[in-house]
Image (cartoon, rainbow, N blue to C red):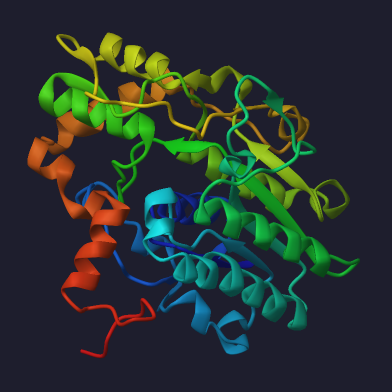
Amino acid sequence: MKIFLTGALGYIGSVINHLLTEEGFTVVGVDAGFFPENCFYREDVWQSRSAIEKLLRKDTRDITSDDLRGCGAVVDFAGLANDPSGELNPQWTDEINHQACVGLARIAKQNGIPRYIFASTCSVYGARGELLLTEDSEVEPVSAYAKAKVATEQDLKSLADRNFHPTILRNATAFGASPRMRFDLVVNNLTGYGYTTKTIRILSDGTAWRPNVHIEDIARAALATLTAPTDEVGGEVFNVGMESENHKVHELANMVSEALTGCKVEIAKGATKDPRSYRVSFKKISRLKTYNPQWSVKKGIQELKDAFERNKLTYEDFQASNYHNLKRMQELIASRKLDNTLRFRPQ
């Protein structure tokens, strides 16, 4: 089967395209090109583009029926990622993370493509404290990013019928090494700070709960729901992660400290409580026979440490815009490479 994968060169997408190819799928990739390819791993270590049969450098708002010709499923992982990037301009966030996703789903449905896997987020649950949240819990999004995801979920559910089977993956906070690396995610950020400065710096008071999931396990969830019988996954919502990996931020910092010798944990001066606090249940997805997550946070921290050593990560590298979504967007806007719709200007 040919899979239409959006965000194909992104932090998670570059891992998904390899897994799909290894499982015998053909991948047509779409990516807007905000980030350089393989900006973390060297080309001889990871060949992300080689797994894609066809790569479209395209904004998801501009996808047409012709782009999807011959595809049997859509795996949608494109978008403006994380809360700070989403707050840069909430209108852009709604256009890209909501309207473009629903538009793509409509095109897929009109062209008889039955499966649509959508990357949502556990942050839709908002500030919920100690509650263990299931897919049936009320959503209380507190950011433009999460609000756009909720709006997309609602519209996808309304499109579902006996011929069109959207599946919604509410991913926990991602971590792990990727060829298109990100250091603006909590585990990656804490480990990067610890490795490059010997200080694990917490920007909040550290008491907020976070569910965590490795990017390879997110990729496995996409594959599992893509290959499961439609009566098990069609029209369904799945939290993606493992309950054992619900941790408070200060617990994550202590794990990093244990893995990196000689590191101290430091809470930033004036740090306040992070309102985004939630614990999540993953019992529903664990019932899928096709899903088998393999990564704990502790195992992922060791993977990151090994990757940093191989790549000789410096503090300057760690802070570079290539690895921080908000920094990169601000850089592209300031340099006028992007226009006022967040599309690339003609060269």
Q: Is residue 314 visible?
A: no
Counting the numbered discs, the total is 0
Residue 177 versus residue 156: which sits nearer the camera?
156
Horizontal side of residue 112 vs 89, given as left or right: right
- The residue positioned 37% from the left and 32% from the top of the image is 186
Residue 26 versus residue 308: which sits nearer the camera?
308
Q: Quadrant of the C terminus?
A: bottom left
- The residue positioned 88% from the left and 51% from the top of the image is 231
Q: Is residue 64 visible?
A: yes
Q: Quadrant of the N terminus?
A: bottom right
Image position, residue 182 (x, y; %): 31, 45
Where on the picture, by quarter, is residue 89?
A: bottom left
Horizontal side of residue 312 vs 236, given as left or right: left
Where on the picture, by quarter, is residue 268?
A: top left
- The residue positioned 48% from the left and 39% from the top of the image is 216
Horizontal side of residue 238 vs 193, given as left or right: right
Residue 267 versus residue 328: which sits nearer the camera?
267
Where on the picture, by quarter, is residue 253?
A: top left
Image position, residue 196 (x, y; %): 13, 28
Is 32 located above or below residue 326 in the figure?
below
Is 301 located above or below residue 70 in the figure?
above
Image position, residue 87 (x, y; %): 41, 57
Image position, residue 15 (x, y; %): 44, 49
Horizontal side of residue 320 vs 132, given as left or right: left
- The residue positioned 48% from the left and 56% from the top of the image is 17
